[in-house]
Image (cartoon, rainbow, N blue to C red):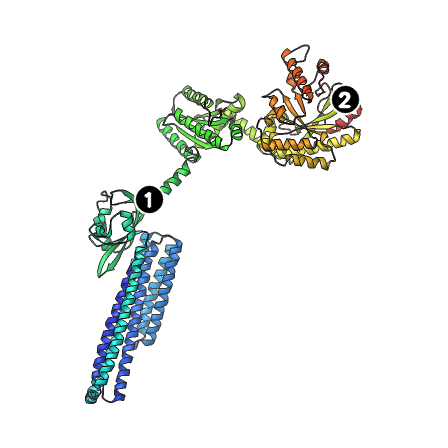
Amino acid sequence: MAYKIKSEKSSECVLAKKRNMKYIVVFLILALACTFSIFLLYTKSVITLNKSFNNYSRVAQAVSDIRKHTLLSQLSLVDLIYIPNKHGLENIASQNDHYDNQVNRAFDLLGKEFVGDKSRVDTVKRVYLDWLSVREQIIARIRLNEEKSLLLNQLQQNTQNIKKINKQLEFLTNTAESKANNITQTSYNGSLEYLRIELLILVLLASCLLIVFYTFQRYITNEKQAVSSQLAWSNKLLESSPDAMIISDRDGVISQVNKSAEDLFGYSKSEFVKLNIATLMPKRFVNHHEKIALFFNHSSARMMGLGKTLYALNKQEKEFPVEISLNLAELNNRKVAITVIRDISEKKQNEAKLIHQANYDLLTNLPNRKLINDRLDQAISRANLSNNKFGVLFIDLDHFKKANDLHGHEFGDKLLICIANVLRDLLRVEDTIGRLGGDEYLVIIPDIIHSESLTNIVEKILLAIECIEPIDGKSVQIGASIGISIYPDCGRNCDQLIRNADLAMYDAKKSLGKSSYSYFEDAMFIQTAEYYALEIALQQAYENNEFYLVYQPKFEIKSQNIIGFEALLRWNNFRFSHLVPEDYIPILEKKNLIYKVGDFVLKTSLEAIKHWQDLTGKELHVAVNISPYQMKDPTFSRSIEKLLETYQLDGRCLEIELTEQTLIEPSLMLDQALANLRKIGVGIALDDFGTCYSSLQYLANYPITSIKVDKSFVSGINNNNFNEIKVVLVNTIVSLGSSLNLMVTAEGIELEEQIKHLLNINCDYGQGYYFSKPLTSENIISLLVKDA
């Protein structure tokens, strides 16, 4: 609305110029009527009058420019306080620079043209500089986002400087006018002596006057057109504002609106002018008239409703949130209120959406970790007031990763949503259900009196998860492990309760197996500390060269000659010397250390077998156990090929041993890796055959070259503790291997009767303590010499 005011002020300045020009024409006619008949004296009189006129006109113009641009600069400060962004702030600052340049030019003109005491011009300029200094202070404070009420107060105080400037400027105008009048009067008195001669040339002077009148009339017409154009531009700018702008009087009666106001409220302009602005506000704002009156009395721009949401009412009496700013202006010599109204419905919706996204999981729409912590704090406060207990359930899904990898991430997302819905249906409204991330959920059960009731809830959750119906026609084999902590017995803040429930969940998963639950106990914290210490020790073990290999010799059962070795990983650590590979290899896999350790095993094994082959001249081979994680590495087969080239070994000297866990999740990458290894001659053995979910389909789908009979079956061949079922299984596996042209190795051979039985059923190879314990590289050389 500042632009609208600017156009009106410019119009007033132009009208003042037109009045001055009419006075000048009158003065010129009087002077010409009283001019001496002598042409030289007439010319002198005209020159004197012109000089007086020009001096006064330039002084008046300069004074008008100073008034206009200081006023525009002051008004722009009002917009600057409410400017919506940094770009708009810089635009208004640029306008102020323009105004300052115009004022400085006007002061320079005053210094040259003012015929009175020049020190009065300097006095006005000092007042202007004081005003300018305060204005720059206000701008600087706006950039620092200081409180608007303080800025508006300082702005109102600075208005007094403008009054001082106008008072001083009025003196300069009066002085210039007086000087011009004196010169004109002198010329008039002198011209009486030459009146008769002047009459002789009256006709000529009348013609000149007509020409001058016509010229000024053209000038006034052009000025009118310029002012009309400027006002049209200002009104067009007003109409282009995206915010609703309403002009009303002291009583709130609307006199003018823009197009945005019509669109926002649904009223036409003709309907608007019949309304009071209070009609656009909900009835609960009963003191709206009082606020308008107070605003007119204090005459300062302000933003309404700071710190709270305001609402407006459209033609259909529908409320919507708005931001409102008020400005006071003078229009046609009367004060009016300019109300700017902005619809912030979309802004409020976006804010609500952001708040929801910050507190809820996007997939399941359950509370996220942030909101869960807040709910836990509330539960703690309520429990302290009522002296009650509440339970925290940490739920981790079993086999979720397997289902996700097998059926895809989209299926996994649907499964997570399904679990969330199961928990919602099963639990009460007052219970809090949240998702911590991944396949982990947290449930808060308030007002626990007996732990038995909590146990019943947990058992219902486990049963419901196990009984989930197929999703997209695909069956779901999934369970959950649940850890339970109780406030205040298991912790007195959010972190302790969640951590201890998490520890109890891991205890349930590790000690009790899948689909089980466990209550937190203090001993679990000690176990966890030991587990973390183990993780740290393993992370340092590779760098400290604590890993080494031993080799279990493999013998041909028929000749009992050594045909190769199985490389076994060992860890030289004093604190954890009691651990076996089965204890720490899962941790190596979890921490992604298995890749470095696996490379170490492969390089060391191939280097050793190369040395032993050169030493004995025999085609020995080495078997290396491969983690499922290594098989997921797309460079795995290529790295083995490079190692074989490095040590100048044939692929047949290496055999990789895979467990059924590696093959249970088929993938194109796995198929390609195994195919590449078989191309270069590397053997592929299926380890612990028959102990898990063995399927003949593995032997059909993968290029398996040998199978290993687990020692738990071989142990059944014992005269003192004979197990007929295990013996039948051993016989079946050996027979199956022979039928499929697969080499069969029996593990864990310790007794002579086991050797005899395996020899009778034509088992190919064997390894175990009967032949030799796992040996270090140094002891292998002695064994090879003895075998030779």
Q: What kind of residue is marked 1?
A: Ser
Q: Secondary structure at mark 1?
A: helix
Q: Is residue 537 visible?
A: no
Q: Nearer the viewer, residue 96 or 555?
A: 555
Q: Tell me: 404 left or right of 669.
A: left
- The correct choice, above or below, for 780 with respect to 11 in the image is above
Q: Nearer the viewer, residue 460 or 140?
A: 460
Q: CA distance from mark 2 to mark 1?
A: 86 Å
Within-10-Å neighbours for mark 1: few <14, some 14–19, many 20+: few
Within-10-Å neighbours for mark 2: few <14, some 14–19, many 20+: some
Residue placed under numbered mark 2 in the picture: 561
Of the residues under marks 2 and 1, which one precedes in the sequence? 1
Q: What kind of residue is marked 2?
A: Asn
Q: Secondary structure at mark 2?
A: loop
Q: Which quadrant: the N terminus? A: bottom left
Q: From the top left corner, tell me how far across and down residue 346 is, in percent.
A: 35, 44
Q: Nearer the viewer, residue 545 or 775?
A: 775
Residue placed under numbered mark 1 in the picture: 345
Q: Tell me: 108 left or right of 676.
A: left
